Image (cartoon, rainbow, N blue to C red):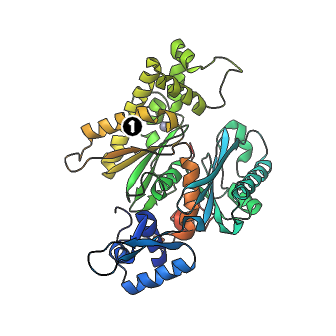
């Protein structure tokens, strides 16, 4: 098992034991002792309390070599729930997940549009209540709400948005307002970091303690998990792989630099090139002029990916060119972190993912610096479109049930480890 090790980052033995059970699926008490390094007495006490609280259940017995069969433990997945919200310009995705991170209900609603923040918050609170009521669970079992929003987000205001249509959200304390409207704690986080946590908790990366998630939404970013903890950097801005330079003479990027991964390979770049080619634009149904625009770059990008999957070679060439740029960024990330695992995730990979996976894997097989020591295994998310929302719910499950140790006391004006800070005050950064 590649989950938590003896060198545990968890705040308590209870958190560590619960996390090992989650990562293992099913596990005996004897294996728990081996995996955590705790004494038999500690494991016995902690497990009894977890069972009493309904978080863990005995699910059967495993054959053992001699002696009596060992009782197996597993998470009681229907014992707790969390809500995840992915707030985007074009739409709001809501999911309700159980303790295991499985989606038990989801809904999509219109984006924030030009409505005033309090109106949108009221709408979101209403949607959350409907989501919980719809599955008939007790609201008492819902631990809280994780929120992924476009940014940059600041710790003082909770939300600061760049698009001109959403300027009226600047300085609006979104997390606090939502926490009051819903009556639940709220954690705010960046999309790529949230998606990485979701992949670790319940996605394709549940067997990996250290990995990177390469995320493509409207832009490109990455989330970094190191020994079971997310690495957020000094201000929550770690992993901005979309803004490393791949071509010193490349196109200008909105971030102020030039030749960035995102400027060369991002959905906006692909869509611009598709629109410039009449054949591809027609195949993808990218109509020109006012009134013919789709609501978002992401929707246009999906249309190009659909055309490629239906056999349009021009559309496929654009995606493969984008994938080769992305593969260079993936190799950079892998070289710096000596990665063994990489997951490709994010809404823009829901349709286009199959074009990116083989090209990124091929680049890492061919040119990853430490390839003689080990390969980098690349996987595609099982739920790329809902990854941010699932990750958002995961943040809340994690913060409430398996909090991590705080690395020292944060100084005024600096950020602590978000997973150890109280909900509704956690800082977050740019969305994409
Ligand atoms: Zn840039």
> x%, y% of residue 290?
70, 19
Work out whether 353 lies above or below 127: above
Is the N terminus in the top left, top right, bottom left or bottom right quadrant?
A: bottom left
Residue 427 makes an appearance in the image: no
Residue at figure coordinates x 51%, y 50% from the top left = 195
For the view shown, which residue lies furthest in the bottom direction?
Answer: 41
Is the C terminus in the top left, top right, bottom left or bottom right quadrant?
A: top right
Residue at figure coordinates x 64%, y 43% from the top left = 88
Residue at figure coordinates x 24%, y 50% from the top left = 374
Residue at mark 1: 357
> x%, y% of residue 329?
38, 39
Estimate how packed mark 1 is, as few (under 14), some (14 to 19) or many (20 or more) residues with alpha carbons within 10 Å. some
238 and 350: which one is in front?
A: 350
The mark total stands at: 1
> x%, y% of residue 38?
37, 80
Work out whether 15 lies above or below 178: below
Work out whether 212 lies above or below 40: above
Q: Is 420 situated left or right of 293 in this image?
A: left
Q: Is 297 situated left or right of 169 in this image?
A: left
82 and 422: which one is in front?
A: 82
Residue 307 makes an appearance in the image: yes
> x%, y% of residue 53?
57, 77
431 and 92: which one is in front?
A: 92
* Quadrant in the picture for residue 150: top right
For the view shown, which residue lies furthest in the top direction?
Answer: 278
Disc 1: residue Cβ within 8 A of ligand 1's nearest atom: no
For the view shown, which residue lies furthest in the left direction?
Answer: 372
Q: Which structural element holds mark 1?
A: helix
């Amino acid at each position: 098992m590649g989950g938590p090790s003896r060198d545990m980052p968890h705040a308590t033995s209870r958190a560590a034991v619960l996390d090992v059970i989650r990562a293992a699926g099913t596990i005996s008490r004897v294996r728990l002792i081996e995996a955590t390094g705790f004494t038999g007495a500690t494991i016995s006490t902690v497990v009894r309390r977890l069972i009493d609280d309904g978080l863990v259940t005995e699910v059967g017995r495993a054959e053992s070599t001699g002696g009596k069969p060992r009782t197996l433990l597993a998470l009681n997945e229907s014992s707790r729930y969390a809500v995840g919200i992915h707030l985007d310009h074009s739409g709001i995705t809501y999911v309700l997940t159980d303790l295991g991170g499985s989606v038990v209900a989801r809904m999509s609603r219109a984006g924030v549009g030009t409505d005033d923040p309090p109106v949108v918050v009221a709408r979101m609170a209403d949607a959350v209540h409907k989501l919980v009521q719809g599955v008939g669970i007790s609201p008492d079992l819902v631990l809280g709400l994780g929120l992924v929003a476009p940014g940059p987000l600041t710790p003082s205001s909770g939300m600061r948005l760049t698009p001109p249509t959403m300027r009226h959200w600047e300085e609006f304390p979104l997390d606090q307002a939502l926490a009051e409207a819903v009556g639940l704690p709220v954690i705010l986080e960046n999309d790529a970091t949230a998606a990485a946590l979701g992949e670790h908790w319940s996605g394709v990366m549940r067997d990996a303690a250290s990995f990177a998630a390469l995320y493509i939404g409207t832009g490109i970013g990455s989330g970094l998990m190191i020994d079971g903890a997310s690495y957020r950097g000094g201000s929550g801005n770690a992993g901005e792989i979309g803004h490393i330079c791949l071509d010193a003479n490349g196109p200008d990027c909105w971030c102020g630099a030039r030749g960035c991964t995102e400027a060369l390979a991002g959905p906006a770049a692909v869509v611009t090139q598709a629109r410039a080619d009449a054949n591809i634009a027609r195949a993808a149904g990218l109509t020109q002029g006012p009134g013919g625009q789709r609501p978002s770059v992401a929707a246009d990008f999906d249309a190009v990916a659909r055309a490629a999957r239906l056999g349009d070679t021009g559309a496929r060439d654009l995606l493969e060119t984008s994938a080769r740029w992305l593969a260079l960024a993936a190799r950079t990330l892998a070289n710096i972190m000596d990665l063994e695992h990489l997951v490709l995730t994010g809404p823009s990979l829901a349709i286009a993912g199959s074009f990116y996976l083989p090209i990124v894997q091929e680049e890492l097989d061919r040119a990853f610096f430490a390839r003689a020591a080990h390969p980098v295994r690349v996987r595609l998310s099982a739920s790329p479109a809902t990854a941010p929302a699932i990750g958002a719910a995961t943040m809340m499950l994690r913060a409430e049930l398996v909090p991590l140790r705080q690395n020292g006391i944060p100084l005024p004006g600096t950020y602590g480890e978000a997973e150890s800070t109280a909900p509704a005050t956690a800082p977050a950064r740019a969305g994409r």
